[in-house]
Each structure stands twice: as structure tokens, then as C-alpha cells.
Amino acid sequence: MGPLVDAEQLAAALRGDDPPVVLDARWTVAGGADRDGYAAGHLPGAVFVDLDRELAGPPGKGGRHPLPHPAAFQAAMRRAGVRAGREVVAYDAGELAASARAWWLLAYHGHRRAGVLDGGLHAWTGAGLPLERGSPAPAPGDFEARPGWRPLLGADGAARLALEGVLLDARTAVRFCGEEEPVDPVAGHVPGAACAPAGANLGEDGRLLPREELRARFERLGVRAGTPVAAYCGSGVTAAGLVLALEVAGFPAALYVGSWSEWITDPDRPVALGP
């Protein structure tokens, strides 16, 4: 399986002799980890992962969702049953944010067989596939967290890339322009960044757009083969979905994981407003 898995493909894999680990990563900015949604019904065998506690470290100068400590992430993935060489598929409610964060973290820490359910929970139920309740207790995994397998930027690296390459901001246009900021205390964007709302990468069915459509969109934003490209958002969650979309389009990209919520912790960093 590749980084994108469709519902029928996942259902067939779950019926196989060595089914993938399935991670339910449902989460919202306003409500946090959606444990109630998980309890009401989840994919067969899915294990819930808490984005705020297991897919991120404590908030602070590194932003609202900095990288988790490798040992903590390793322990969380082992509790979920993640093993070396075993497929892992993450899903969310369909916004391609928290699931992509799980995918990116697994890849960053050296697990090469991770993917995301294209369209999330809605694609699964829309295909007439069943949900179940209860909390499975998988056998402990042997996953080893070995950081550094995907390109990662800090604030200084993001500032340089905005000048030397293409830095894409995955937030909505009103947040990028500084017209609204419902989450962070300072509005605006990193100078030199381009506005690339992640929601525009999804079709009406909630699935990622076809490769050629994605590629054309990113090319309009200045992305080219050989040009350094990276993504950021408010706290490094939605931007992981943008990195996934870029990869599907054929453009490997770095993630500025601290994102805007880290950028603004230093009052000396410049803030740009407007389009």
C-alpha cells in the first residue's frame, strides 16, 4: 500500500492474514481528541491515538503541537501494536490532518509502511463498510523510533526557505492574511510564504484530488521539481496533510512542525499581513 489507501483496499487488507494496524486519530482544533466519536463507532480493530498527548509533545516555545519525545512516541505506537514491517493505516474524520500527522510521524521516525485512509471515516461508511465499538487490546508492538527520516524545519530554516524556495501556508486565506485568527494570539503569516489552504486539495467527496490536479495546483504556487518546498500551518497538523498531498503530486516537501504557533513565540520574528 502507498501513502493513500482507499476504503475497499483497506477492508480487503483487514481480511488478510497479516492485517494492518489501524489508528483512529480523530481530532478537532476546538474539541481536541475525539474519544467520544471513537467510542460511538470506529473501524474494525482500530486503536485510538490522542493527537495532543501521543502525536505531540507538551505545548510551549516549540508551538502548540511540537514533536513528541521519541521515547514517548515509541511507547504510544507499541501500545497500538505497531511492529517493524507491518502496515499502519491512520484515519480521521476526513479532513486529512490528524491522520496525516500520524503518517508523517511514523515516517519521520523510520517506519516506512504507513498510510492514510483517503477520505477518512466518511469514505469508509460511505462504502457501506461496518464500524464496531469497544477498545481492542492489541499485542504490544516492537516499533523503534529513529528520528530523522523526513525533512524537518525549525523557524530559521522556514525563514530561509521562504526566500530560497517555496514555503506553503496550509491555513485558510483569512488566517494567512491576518483578517481572522481564532486560535493563536498573533495574526498573519511568515514573510515570503504562499497561501495554500489545505482544504483546496480535497474534492467534494472528501478524498484527495487526483495527482495531476494536485500537481497543477502546486505548480501555480511556484512549486517545481528541484525547488525546495516546505509546509506549515498553525501547529504542524494540517500542514502534514499538505506534505502528503505534495508527495502524492510528486514533490517531496519538508514540514515546519512548530509552524505559526512557534513562529510567534519570538517577538523579534517578523509578521506579514495581507495577501
Image (spheres, grey):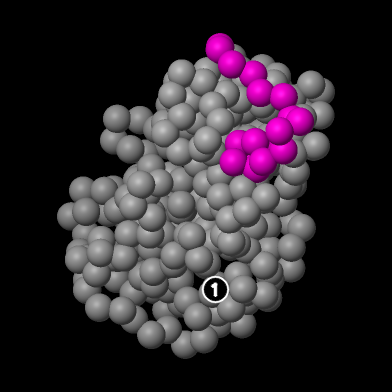
Q: Residue at (42%, 84%) from the top-left corner?
A: 138
Q: Is residue 222 visible?
A: yes
Q: Position of residue 53 (x, y in %)?
A: 50, 66
Q: Is residue 198 left or right of residue 130?
A: right
Q: Position of residue 61 (x, y in %)?
A: 67, 50
Q: Is residue 113 left or right of residue 35?
A: right
Q: Is residue 24 left or right of residue 189?
A: left
> Where, by quadrant of the figure, is residue 26 drawn?
bottom left
> Where, by quadrant of the figure, is residue 239 drawn?
top right
* Residue type for callout 1: Met
Q: Residue at (45%, 38%) from the top-left corner?
A: 183
Q: Residue at (46%, 52%) from the top-left corner?
A: 98
248 vs 227: above or below: below
Q: Which residues are magenta?
A: 259-275
Work out whether residue 119 or residue 250 is closer to the camera in this orientation and state it: 119
Q: Residue at (43%, 44%) from the top-left corner?
A: 96
* Overall secondary structure of the magenta section: loop
Q: Secondary structure at mark 1?
A: helix
Count of marks, rendered view? 1
- Give yes or no for residue 262 being in the magenta stretch: yes
- Label 1 Cα neighbours within 10 Å, binned few <14 / some 14-19 / many ≥20: many
Label 1 belongs to which residue?
Answer: 77
Q: What is the quadrant of the C terminus in the image?
A: top right
> Where, by quadrant of the figure, is residue 42 drawn?
bottom left
Q: Position of residue 169 (x, y in %)?
A: 58, 29
Q: Is residue 215 visible?
A: no
Work out whether residue 97 or residue 2 is closer to the camera in this orientation and state it: 97
- Give yes or no for residue 65 being in the magenta stretch: no
Q: Position of residue 258 (x, y in %)?
A: 65, 45
Q: Is residue 235 left or right of residue 23?
A: right
